[in-house]
Image: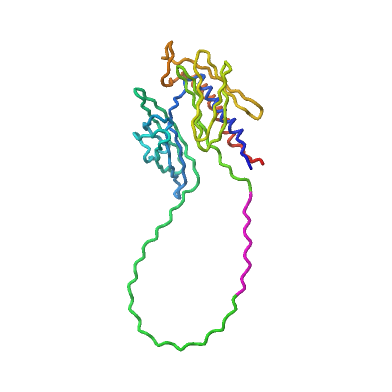
Amino acid sequence: MNRLNFRRVAAAAAGVLIGLAGVAAVAAPASAHHPIIKGVGCKLTDGTVKVEWTVTNSERHWVATVAAVQTPSGAPVTNIVVGAEVPKAGEGALVGEQIVPGGQQAHLTVKAVWKKNRNTVTNTQTGKARIVGKCAEPEPTPEPSESPEPSESPEPTESPEPSESPEPTESPEPSESPEPTPTPTGEPVVPEPGEPTFELTETCDELTFLINNPADGVPFSITLTSEKGATKTLEAVPGETTSVTFDAYPGLVVTPSYEDEDGTVEGESVAWEQPEGCGNGGGGGLPVTGAATGGIIAGAAVLLAAGAALFVVTRRRRVRFTA
């Protein structure tokens, strides 16, 4: 049985997580609440692209409300509008259709809002549609034909005398059946796996690492080790959102690592810092978010770009089957 080797994809995905770990070290992390956007499109004969967008909720206990919708082309999306509700995770999705003009990007940005008691959480995500080819053309509906007017019956004519029966002709011999066309052989086309997304959440008493792996993604694992030697494994499961949480305390430092072809590779360590507003007694609550100075944001963006570049380069390499 052939088995697909996903080691390079797993290593690249871990690189993205390491880049996000650098972001958490110099800037406040994003909230775990987020809309999940997927789009599938096909090309029409007039050059436009028809896209079906699906927006689902990352939260199982709270309904989200669409606060803003943006597209690069400005083309409207049916059903996905401001004020529309996104059901809880596992209870349905918000589905809409868009016609994107030729040459325009098929992107969709959705800002969602969650109201939890007296607190409000917002998050904005952008999805890119996957173009699968040309749209199937509908079969034309036949037009009903007009009923012909009845014609007058012709007068009967005299029956002609029967002529002599023609001599039977020999039936032609059946020709040989053409040989079947051989089916071309070659390497099977392997679809590229879906790209996972990563998040870090830092609260007054917890440090959480989260992976959202799409249904067409690949499984992989990342080892997280604290400075005291406590080890936890973060498993990326296709079609699920998984997370690992460390109890926060002064001096907590977590180092991510993964297995590569050359052995164990360690990423940049993440040091927990107590967010503002926690007080001396600590306490839970929503993740603390906020903007940092320009220098801090620039450094975090470089780390995130490095992890994303590693993921893209690995996906473009050719995948081979081994016996």
Is 101 covered by the magenta stretch? no
Is 179 covered by the magenta stretch? yes
Q: Position of residue 300 (x, y in %)?
A: 51, 22
Q: Residue furthest top?
A: 280
* Magenta-tinted stretch: 172-185
Q: Residue at x 56, y 30 (%)?
A: 13
Q: Position of residue 107 (x, y in %)?
A: 45, 37
Q: Nearer the viewer, residue 256 or 136?
A: 256
Q: Residue at x 39, y 25 (%)?
A: 121
Q: Nearer the viewer, residue 216 or 154?
A: 216
Q: Residue at x 65, y 26 (%)?
A: 263
Identify the image's colour scheme: rainbow, by chain, secondary structure or one colour: rainbow
Q: Residue at x 34, y 66 (%)?
A: 146
The quadrant of the rendering that contains the C terminus is top right
User: Compared to 57, does 206 lie above or below?
Assistant: above
Q: Position of residue 41 (x, y in %)?
A: 46, 43
Q: Nearer the viewer, residue 187 or 44?
A: 187
Figure quadrant of residue 70 = top left
Q: Residue furthest bottom?
A: 161
Relative to 178, 287 lies left or right = left
Q: Position of residue 197 (x, y in %)?
A: 50, 30
